[in-house]
Image (spheres, rainbow, N blue to C red):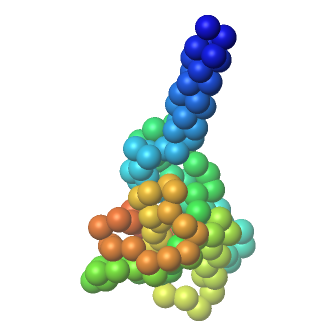
Amino acid sequence: MNRFWALIVLLSTASLTLACGSSSNNSGRQLQSISINSTVVGQQVQFTATGTFSAPPTTVSPLPVSDWGIGPFAPPPANVQYTLTTQPYVFDCLGSPSGMPVSTLAPSDPNAPTTGSLPWAKVVTASAPVPCP
């Protein structure tokens, strides 16, 4: 009879461990949108990204993003090489063209590696105006 209860305790513990472990996987959690925040310091503008996800934690800031640049992603490539960073993007307003937006992207899967290649359909992009003084 003791073996029976030991087996029940062992199976219960294993089930509980698996259930708790799967909650940290976030397999259904996806990046839904990116907002770009800007801070003007003299003639430079510093940009950071905030991500909104489909499940908690729903907001991540700074969001690791890739491919900061000026202008839209046009035409979008079939695949994109990316390297994620939380470092701000700094734009120097002196001598730079104005009127173009700053753009960035991130994988929609929060468990994607920090560097790699993905189909364009599996990334989320964002653009924002450059508020040069």
Q: Position of residue 92 (x, y in %)?
A: 63, 82
Q: Position of residue 111 (x, y in %)?
A: 52, 57
Residue 128 visible, this angle: no
Residue 15 visible, this angle: yes
Which residue appears farthest toward the top when viewing the image? 1
Which residue appears farthest toward the bottom when viewing the image? 95
Quadrant including the N terminus? top right
Q: Residue at x 45, y 64 (%)?
A: 107
Task: State how many labels appear.
Answer: 0
Q: Position of residue 43 (x, y in %)?
A: 68, 77
Towards the viewer: 25 or 1:
1
Q: Give above or below for 127 relative to 108.
A: below
Quadrant including the C terminus? bottom right
Q: Residue at x 52, y 45 (%)?
A: 25
Towards the viewer: 36 or 115:
115
Please state if 100 lies on the left or on the right of 13 as rendered: left
